[in-house]
Each structure stands twice: as C-alpha cells, then as structure tokens.
Amino acid sequence: MTLRLVRLALCCLVLLAVLFPTPPVRGYPIDGFALTGIERLVRLTRMDSTTLLRTLPYGARHELEYVRLNLMDDPLYELPEVDAELQEEIGQIFPDMHPSYSVAVFDMTEGRPHRYAERNPTAGYQPGSVGKLAVVTAFFCELQNLYPDDYAARWELMQSKVVKAGPFGVYDHHTIPLYDTASERYARKRVDPSDEFNLYQWVDHMLSVSNNGAASIVWREALLMRVFGKDYPDLGHDDMMTYFDTIDRSRLRGLGEDIVNGPLRDMGIEGDAWRLGTMFTRGASAIVPPKGGSTGTVRGLMQWLTALESGQVVDAPSSLEIKRLMYMTDRRIRYAHAPVLDSAGVYFKSGSLYGCKPGTSCGKYRGNRMNYMNSVAIVEQPDGARYLVALMSNVLGRNSAYDHQVLATRIDRVMRRTAAEDPSESLGTGE
C-alpha cells in the first residue's frame, strides 16, 4: 500500500475519531512515528517498563486514538457568561497569590452544563512561548490553503518535506532530542544552522521542548507556503534564501505579521487579546523584521482553547492534529508537573520571559524588571472531568513555577469538586 493510501485511510480514521470518539485505551502516546517521522517517539517504545514509568506519568501513556476533541458535539462559537458559583470558587483559591495573576477556566465535563470563570481576563502579558500555539495555528492554516480538501496530502507533506534550519534556527538555549533509530543513541543539542528535520519534527521541537529556533522555522515555513503556493513542496534551501535576500523588508514585515495573526482574527480573537509581533530568534528577526509587539490575555487564550476543542482551529482534522502534538510533550513542567495531574491526559504549553534591571543580577525566572510565566492546559482526568485552563502571571523576583503547580492542584480540586487530601497539597518542586 502506498504512503498516500495509508494517509487517506488515516484521514478517514481521524474523521471517524472526531465524529465518533472512542473510549480511552491503554497504551502510549508513541505510536505515531510511522505517520510522522518523529524519531524521539521510537525511543519511548523501546524503553523497558521500569524506565518508561520513570519517564512518563500514567496520563501521558495513551495512544493517539485516545485523543479526541471534547466539544465537537456541542461546539462553542464564543465564550459563555461567567458562572457565578464557579467564579466564587476560583476567587477563593487566590487569596495569598500576587495580584498580577490572571486565570480563565472552562469546565467541559460531559454530562453537566458548561461552566466558565475568569480573573483579570483582559490584563495583557508578554505571552512568551505560549505564543507558539499561534505559530502552529498559522502553519496548519497555510497547509489548509495548500490542500483545502486533501487532509492526507497535508500530513504527507509534513512527513516527507525536510527543511534546513539556516539562520532562522539560532540562537536558543533550549535543546532538542536526537535519537538514532538504528544505533539507539540518544542525545540532546542546541539547534544549529545545518540541522535538518521534516516538518513534523520541527513542529514537535517547537511544542514538546519549546525550542525557539524551531518556532522561527515553523513560522518561516508558513510564510513560504503563502508566498510559493503550489511550488512550496519542491522549494529548496538555496531558493528560499534567495527569496529572503531579495524581498523588500517592509513587505516582509507585514507578511510575517499577517501570517501569524490573521488566523487568530478569523477566529474572533482580537489583537489586544492575543498577537505576536516578533519571531523567536535573533537570526530570524534579522531577516523578518518585527511588527507590532506581542501580547496575550487569558481570555484570548481561552478563546483559542475552546475553538480547538470545537474543531475550529483551521478545521476539525487540523485541530485534532494540533491537540495530538500538544499531548506528546517531552516532559511536564510548572503547571503540568502537579502530582494531581499524573493520571490525567494533559495537553500543555508553557511560556516565560524574564529580564533584569540594568546593573543587577536577578537569576533565571526571577526577573526584577519583568518576570512573565504563562501556562495553557487541557486536562482530562480518568474520572471523566474535562476542563481548560489559561494562567498568566508577572511576579517580580520570584520563580512562579511552584505557584503555578499549587494553582494546578487547587483548580483541579474545584473542577472535580473534591476535597483537599492534606495541607501540603501533595506538591513537588514545580520543575
């Protein structure tokens, strides 16, 4: 059977999974290598059970078929009114938290009415790496423009097209995983200009380990799809660089901004609720000039999350594929590291940006000039509880990872309507 026929069959299964969701099955989120070429997944399949238990919590070991869109049967087109009872409960978990904290939560548990609550919903924050969700949205939007009615062709292109990092990939301290499926050698490294991966792997590097170079490359590829259209699949690295060397910079600035923000506006997310203005690496920003700055609010992020679960981020197959990519994270940190979420399926993106005042040394994630830390999570507990969370903060001088983990525990208790087990809330380190 040809790869294209396999992809066609897969698309039929995707549509069936969206329309007729299957119950949870036992397994691992690692059965997607043959469909994606993401090599790090092979390493997980080859681990012995003891090593796998140390590497992945229970909730991170579902198969791809487990992942479904929770609001397909009852899609949301705008956020509901605040639920007074839930609003009061959420307000009670913040008495000892810094006033800069903003949060939005949405309960989509099957069998009970939708409930929504928010705190400081329109306060603007630098979104940091949470903005990479806007980049993946732009990328899938341009894939749809290339192949409006051929889902299999989209996934086939993501697997088959290999692109080089070039100057867009530098510089970033986040490392990416490298696994040789033949020798079984595993390592981690920073992205350098010579690195080559297929599109699925670049998207995975962007979301699973939050690599900034990968984010700039995925943004770049979305832009190139828009510019070259049907010629994009055969576009080579040299021709790409020739384009960037010769294009008018002012035109490129506007194009780069429209590529990433246009899909958000089409979803009804306004510019003051969420926008990106700058690529994620200096190498990329030197080529595609920034425009307009970046900001985010918990309300804007919640609009995106509900659209994703409703199959409205581009379209239903794209929404499902994005959610799968959010599930296959490299490790759980910050909000997602809360032990109360160990048994839950968690689809997660975190982001941070900190800076020190001139002449001071403030430490990593302890900025005294700015200290943004943001978390976006879809939580699916084994007891059937399903809810969405967007959390943003700017607490100067303090690493808020632990506080985000505390809030994850408290929010889970509210959303599942459970009592505290003990005063310590069973917390770890946050990292």
Image (spheres, rainbow, N blue to C red):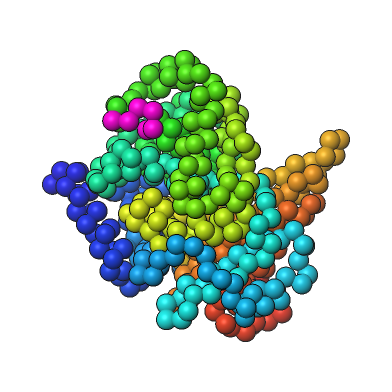
Q: Is residue 262 left or right of residue 320?
A: right
Placement of 196 over or under 319, stated as above or below: above
Specify whether residue 283 is in view: no
Does 359 sit left or right of 336 as displayed? Answer: right
Write down the region rendered in magenta. Answer: 225-230
- Classified by dominant secondary structure, the portion drawn in magenta counts as helix
Q: Residue at x 30, y 70 (%)?
A: 22
Q: Is residue 22 above or below residue 328?
A: below
At a point 49% along the width and 36% down the height, the residue shown is 258
The residue that appears at 69% across and 62% down in the rendered structure is 120
Q: Quadrant of residue 210?
A: top right
* Image coords of residue 264 (percent x, y): 49, 48
Q: Is residue 398 visible?
A: yes
The quadrant of the picture occupied by the C terminus is: bottom right
Judging depth in this view, the residue of 414 and 199 nearest the camera is 414
Q: How many marks?
A: 0
Up-down: is 144 above or below 254? below
Residue 299 position, x and y percent, is 59, 59
Residue at the limit of the structure toward the left, as seen here: 1
The structure residue drawn at horizontal position 33% and vertical position 73%, both measured from the top left corner, is 23
Foreground pick, 238 / 104:
104
x then y, percent, for residue 192 = 51, 29
Is 209 included in the stretch rendered in magenta? Answer: no
Q: Nearer the viewer, residue 224 or 425?
A: 224
Q: Is residue 71 above or below residue 282?
A: below
